[in-house]
Structure formats: C-alpha cells, structure tokens
Amino acid sequence: MIQEQIHENVFQRHLEKSSIFSNRSIITPHYTPQRLPFRDKQIEQISEVVSPALQSTKPDNLFVYGKVGTGKTVTVNHVMSQLCEFISQNNSQVDFAYINCRNHNSKYKVILKALSKFCPTKDFIGYSNAFVYEKLLHYAEKGKQLVLVLDEIDKVRDLDELIYALTRSNDELQHGGISLIGISNNLFFKNKLDARTKSALMQREMVFPPYNADELKAILQDRVKMAFRPNTVEESAINLAAALAAQETGDARAAVMLMLRAGEEAERHNMGSVSDVHVRMAKSRVEQEVTLHMVETLPKQQQLVLYAISLMTLQGKGFGKLNGSREEGIFFSGDAYREYERIASGMSEHVVSSRWFREYVNELETYGLLLTTASGKGVRGTTTLIKLGFDAKKLQKALEKELLCA
C-alpha cells in the first residue's frame, strides 16, 4: 500500500476529481468574448474614427480612457479584428499593429514591434532608431494607412518623442499615413506632453464608464453559462459578485475574477455548487489581486507617489501632535511630497509640482489606495493627512518590480 502511494503521480487525483467548471478559461480575465455587451456605442464610435482609412484617408488619432476593467482594450481589439476581417475580404490598403507599451516602453521598442507585425520576415533588431523609423515610413509610403494601437501608452518613457515623430511623419509621406489609438487608465497623461506635440496630435477622445451592477450581472450570466456545468452556480452568487464589483470599482475583470475564485473555493470544499458563501470567501483574495494589478498599470508618477508613502509607512514614520504623542502611518501632505521628491529625483524622474502631487493623491484615493482627511485638533496649522489604504509591504514589492526593473 505504501509502495503504491509512493508511485502514484500527484496530478492523477486532480484529473480524476469531478469539476464544476466545464471550461475554466472562459471565466478568467484573459478570455476575450465574441460579444461585448454594453459597449455597442463605443464600438460604433471607434469604428467611425478608423473608417476613413478604408478610403485611403488618414484617420484622426484617438485616445481611449477609463479605469481598469471597463473594457477599453477588449473593445478596441474587437474593432481591430473586425477591421482585419474587412481588409482580408476587400483587399484594402490598411494595416494595424497592437502594441502593449508596458512591454515595449520606448519609441524604439514601439516602432520595432510595429515593424515585426508589418514586415514579419525581416529582423530589424540592432539597427538604429533612425533606421527603424525610416523603415516604418517606407512601409507606409507604399500607400498603406497604418493604425498603431498603443495600449498603456502612458508607460512609454520617451512618449513626447514617439507621438511627435509618428504624427509628424505624415508630413513626409506622399502616399499612405500613420494614425494612433492610445489606450490609458490616466485621463491626464497628455498634460505632460509639450506644446508642439499636442498641437500635432489632432486627436479625438473617449472615456469608458464603469459598469453598473445590472450590467456586471448580465456579463457574469453570459460567462457562467459557458464556464460552469449546468446548475452549479446559484443565482444569488452571481448577484452578489456583481454587486460587490459594482460597489468597489465597476470593474468587469474584478467581477469575473470573483466568480472564478468563488468556483475554486466551492471545489476546495467539495461542494457541488457555488453559493454566496463562496463569493464572500473569495472576496478578500480577489481584492488583493485586483489592487496589485491596478498598481502595476498606474502611471509612473502615481506609482512614485504611492511608493513614497509605502516606504514612509514601512519605516514607521508619522506625525507628532502638539501634546507630544505620535501617530505612525499617517503623514502630513508636505512630508509625503518631500519624500516623493527625494525618490523621483533619485530615479532621475521628472518631479511634478505640489499641485499635481495633490491631484495624484486624490486620484489614488478614488482607487482606495490612499486615505486622506483634513488635520483637526492637536495639529499645528491646517493641512491634509495621508494614510496608506493597502498593505505596505505588498505595495512596496509590486512597485519596486515596476519602478526598479523597468
């Protein structure tokens, strides 16, 4: 008996175990559905912006904004897949490339990635910045209307140079053109562009709203039908997952992850169906996953602000009251700004003004990452007090991965 247990493969029991999932991948955030409910308006608007390319006319540049989980990327890619299908059937001189700027975070890397899509048989790695830029223009000069989809566009380190070069490139082209679709969580990222770049953009803008509870419920119902076996998810569990996600951020990704983790909890406890209890059990786990993912996608300046306050928290810093007592983990806005200045300068990053620092703090508060309040009795003067709203050690680890390994 002991010998049999030794030779039994550890994965065998997982394969033999009955599962409430019929297709688990469908209830993950990485699954791209065929139908995008509640985004018909945005699909129509994006296709309207891009459609002039089909008449060999350069489209306007488009910037798409919205919080995490509002469907920005999946909607843009849906329109691009429709464009690809149309191009293949109508022999149109339009081409596009999707580029994730988190992975390709410089002008050189963006253009190199675009060329790998447009000229897949050629390898341009190692050539100069100027050379790959000219190759991109040469490809467009064949009469091609190129659409570059730049996801998380605010992650590009030399964004000014990239946008200016790509928009001004159209002045050099006799045939064809290059247009951009930028996707960002940060509505204000264009504020850091210089005046000449902004004047060259000629952009249109869209903001994706968060989903409400009814919309999230409908999205989850669609996914559950395909991802779980029949009658294994209680309706009340779907309602609760949708309500919790809507209450927090209106994030469809969070709602889907909550249902996935609830299913895993049900299986872990050998239950034949997912109930409200499993959704509540999964809630804290999902909140951490969603928060850490959100931190990874924040604009660099907001990451620096959050990193400064995380370090201050871990170092046990705080503020002293007039009566001599001390409050650890709560900071004067001015002290937090000085720590941010120190860290940003140490990383050779641009230091924003105290006014923009306050804007970033306010936005981080809307995500639940920071808590602020006006100072009250026992404090000299009137200022804003700032406190971290998430585990400092986990934030530090996630932010150092982003800021120090970029």
Image: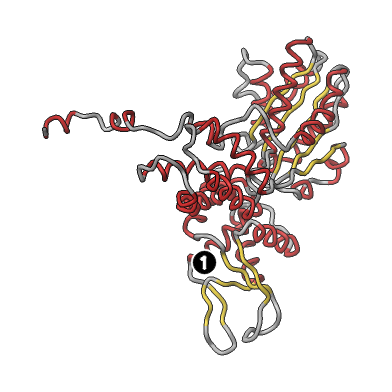
Residue 289 image point, x, y percent: 51, 48
Q: Position of residue 184 (x, y in %)?
A: 70, 42
Q: Secondary structure at mark 1?
A: helix
Depicted 238 relative to depicted 352: above or below: above
Q: State left or right for residue 302 relative to residue 18.
A: right
Which residue is pictured at 80% across the width and 41% down the height?
A: 206
Question: Label 1 belongs to which residue?
Answer: 313
Q: What quarter of the picture does the C terminus occupy?
A: top right
Badge count: 1
Query: At 11% from the left edge and 34% from the top edge, which residue is drawn?
Result: 2
Q: Residues within 10 Å of mark 1 (few under 14, many from 20)?
A: many
**Residue 363 drawn above or below residue 227:** below
Residue drawn at x 87%, y 18% as measured from the top left = 56
Q: Is residue 299 visible?
A: no
Residue type at numbered disc 1: Thr
Q: Residue at x 87, y 36 (%)?
A: 202
Q: Would residue 191 appear left or right of 30 to someone viewing this image?
A: right
